[in-house]
Image (spheres, helix red, strand yellow):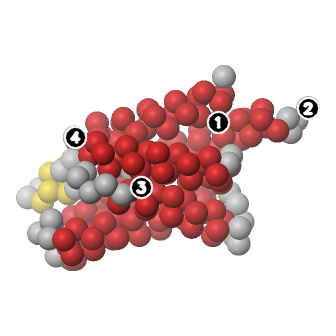
Amino acid sequence: MIRVLVIFVAVFLFYMEPVFGLLSPVSIGQQFYILVPRFLLIYLVFVAIYYNRKRAILFGVIFGLLYDVFFIDIIGLYTFIYPILIFISVWVMRYIHLNVLTLSLLILLLLAGLESLLFVFHTIIGTTTLVFDEFLQLRLIPTMIANFVFVAVMGWFFKWLLVQRYEQKYHVNT
């Protein structure tokens, strides 16, 4: 049952990202802030660390391709970026102590890198009108705050679910 739940959570988060994206931009005073949910990437990093690196990279390729096909017109951008970020997270976590707090901080750094990389890419091809200061103030910082709240709320559940699946698969407690 938990095996199916691991995949179901990934599919559910894939579909929930655009739903939460509809809440953006958020108006505070005279300023509009753009919140970009990256729930699926956060979950895939948890899958890579607490369950199975190869499966997380495979999910990254599949969901990255689906994201490219359904949400943007550039095929291959997320298909390439998601597995690379998952691989980087696994590599970094080999050298630092594993707990939810350090993983959460790593996820925030990866999200900052992802958003910055996407900003540079869209600036190069000319599909954004933001300058870097506006990007930092209006998109990156609000996105980081929103995704931090998501990690703080859901991180413990993700860890519990994936540890349960790992123990079920490898019979750790029997």
Tell me the distance, in whole angstroms, between the alpha carbons under discs 2 and 4: 46 Å
Give the residue at mark 3. 79
Amino acid beneath label 2: Thr
**Direction from residue 60 to residue 167 in the image, left or right:** right
Relative depth, front residue between 7 and 49? 7
Query: Do the numbered discs 2 and 1 sit on residues whose CB atoms are within 8 Å?
Result: no
Q: Residues within 10 Å of mark 4 (few under 14, many from 20)?
A: few
Kindly identify which numbered label has been placed on residue 22.
Answer: 4
Amino acid beneath label 4: Leu
Kindly identify which numbered label has been placed on residue 161.
Answer: 1
Residue 3 percent coordinates (x, y): 65, 30
Q: Residue at x 59, y 28 (%)?
A: 5
Kindly identify which numbered label has been placed on residue 174.
Answer: 2
Residue 103 percent coordinates (x, y): 60, 59
Residue 158 position by quadrant: top right
- Visible residue check, residue 149: no
**Direction from residue 78 to residue 95 in the image, left or right:** right
Residue 101 position by quadrant: bottom right
Q: Earlier in the sequence, mark 1 or mark 4?
A: 4
The kind of secondary structure element at disc 4 is loop
The kind of secondary structure element at disc 1 is helix
Where is the C terminus found, in terms of image quarters? Answer: top right
Query: Do the numbered discs 4 and 3 sit on residues whose CB atoms are within 8 Å?
Result: no
Query: From the viewer's perspective, is residue 169 above or below residue 33?
Result: above
Amino acid beneath label 1: Leu
Q: Earlier in the sequence, mark 2 or mark 1?
A: 1
The kind of secondary structure element at disc 3 is helix
Q: Earlier in the sequence, mark 2 or mark 4?
A: 4
Query: From the viewer's perspective, is residue 19 above or below residue 41?
Result: above
Q: Residue furthest top?
A: 1
Query: From the viewer's perspective, is residue 73 above or below residue 164?
Result: below
